[in-house]
Every structure is written in structure tokens, then in C-alpha cells.
Image: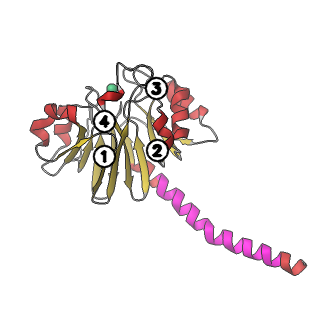
Amino acid sequence: MKQRMIYIILITGLVSLYMAPEIHSEESKLMDMVNNIHWLGQATVKISVPGKTIYIDPYQIKKTDLADIILITHSHSDHLSPEDIAKVSSDQTIIIAPGDCLEQIKNIARDKTIISEPGLIKQLGNILIEAVPAYNVVKTNFHPRTNNWVGYVLTLNGIKIYHAGDTERIPEMKDFECDIALLPLGQTYTMNSVKEAAEAAIDVKAKVAIPIHYGLVEGQNQDAREFKALLKDKIKVIIKEKE
Ligand SMILES: [Zn+2]
């Protein structure tokens, strides 16, 4: 009996020794990706991994790198800015945007534009892009569901990043899965409360949540701190400095 116990202890010890570096490397891979995500104000996010630069909703950007991919969530002027898209576009840039954005960017995008709507799945090199629904449930006149506007789930280096676009907490979120969630805190046009944004982070099963879409026309720095406090011991919240 005693011998059996010793065996069990030995085996448990060996298994945990074997597993520990794996857990550690998963976590450091996730945090490396968090560091590759730059918040440029409002809903503008730049993701830089070696060899690829992705912009989501570029708006009022200062420092510009050329984009390989630009994702647009919807046609409101703080998300669809032809001027900013032009700043980071080259001949090689692929733009993915909802159909109602195309008219405004037709001179920039030319033939390299992909029309997005909820359900779109696109593999571009080693990046998988999925467009998911984004809409208002309560404030339906701002982002009606029927507009087919989107958020995006990107998979790169094995990490799933969800950019919610302008949305309230919607039932579909329970079917989304991501490692890192970029969620809007503005409470005039998007989420109805900071609590709702925190619940959305739980719905999408994020390991790390980063608040965006605050501090300009709606939502305050205090809201980001409240978001972090609400998710304490549940989800790691990283409050990014605006770059
Ligand atoms: Zn909007």
C-alpha cells in the first residue's frame, strides 16, 4: 500500500513537471500577442506580428505603418475613415469591409476588397478571419441588426483575437470563442453599461480582455478601471495606453 502511494506521488510529480513548461509557454504566447496589439484610440487597433500588420477601423492615426490587411467593422465615420485607410494602404493591402463602406473607399481599395458580412470566413496566408454579427439590441437606431455590420475574430499564431465592432451584448456572443477580446466601453452607442461589457467578455470566453472605444466621445478612463474591477479573478484585463 505504502509502495503504491509512493508510485502515485512520483508519477503525479513527473506529470506536473512535464506539463508545467507547456502551460507556461501557452501563457507567454498569449501575452506576446497581447503585446503585439496596439490601441490607437476609439476602436482603432493595430496588430503587428513579424511579417504582418493588421489595422482594424483606422481612425485619426498618427504614426503609420503600411497594412497588409485592413478590417472595417461598419460605415460610421469613426470606424470608416477613407483618409486614414489611404494613409496605411499600399497596392498590396487587402481591405475587408461591409458592402455599404465600398463607395467611400472605391478609389483606395480597387479590386483588393473583400465584402464582409456576418458569417464570412477568409483565410489570408496564415491568418484566419471570421466576421461575426455586431448590432444594438436596445439602441437599435444606431447599429440595426439588418445592416449586417460586423466584428471580427482573427486567428493568428494559434491565438484568437475578437474585435467586437460597435455592438451591445448580443446572444450570439455565447457561441464565440476567443483568447483576447477587444470590447467597446462607450455606453451611448455600444454597450449599455460597463457591467454589460464585462458580461460580454465572459460570454466570449476571453482569457484576456482589452477595453476599447472609450475616452473620445463616450466612455471614460474610470469605466476601464471599473471593467477591470468587475472581472477581477475571472478574466485578466489589460488597460492599454492609447498610442
Ligand atoms: Zn458605430
Q: Which residue is mark 3?
A: 191
In the rendering, at what x and y percent does residue 11 appear? Answer: 73, 75
Q: Are marks 1 and 4 in contact (CB under 8 Å)?
A: no
- Residue in the image at 18% along x and 49% along y: 93
Which quadrant does the C terminus fall into?
A: top left
In the rendering, at what x and y percent does residue 81 appear? Answer: 22, 31
The numbered dot on residue 73 is 4
Q: Is residue 241 visible?
A: yes
| Callout 4 amino acid | Thr
Mark 2 CB lies closer than 8 A to ligand 1: no
Main SS, magenta residues? helix
Q: Are marks 1 and 2 in contact (CB under 8 Å)?
A: no
The crowd level at tag 1 (other Cα within 10 Å; few <14, some 14-19, many 20+) is some
Q: Which residue is mark 2?
A: 176
Spatial separation of the CA atoms under disc 1 and disc 2:
14 Å
Q: Which residues are magenta?
A: 6-31
In the rendering, at what x and y percent does residue 241 appear? Answer: 42, 36
In the rendering, at what x and y percent does residue 199 appear? Answer: 55, 33
The numbered dot on residue 120 is 1
| Callout 2 amino acid | Phe
The crowd level at tag 3 (other Cα within 10 Å; few <14, some 14-19, many 20+) is many
Spatial separation of the CA atoms under disc 2 and disc 4:
17 Å
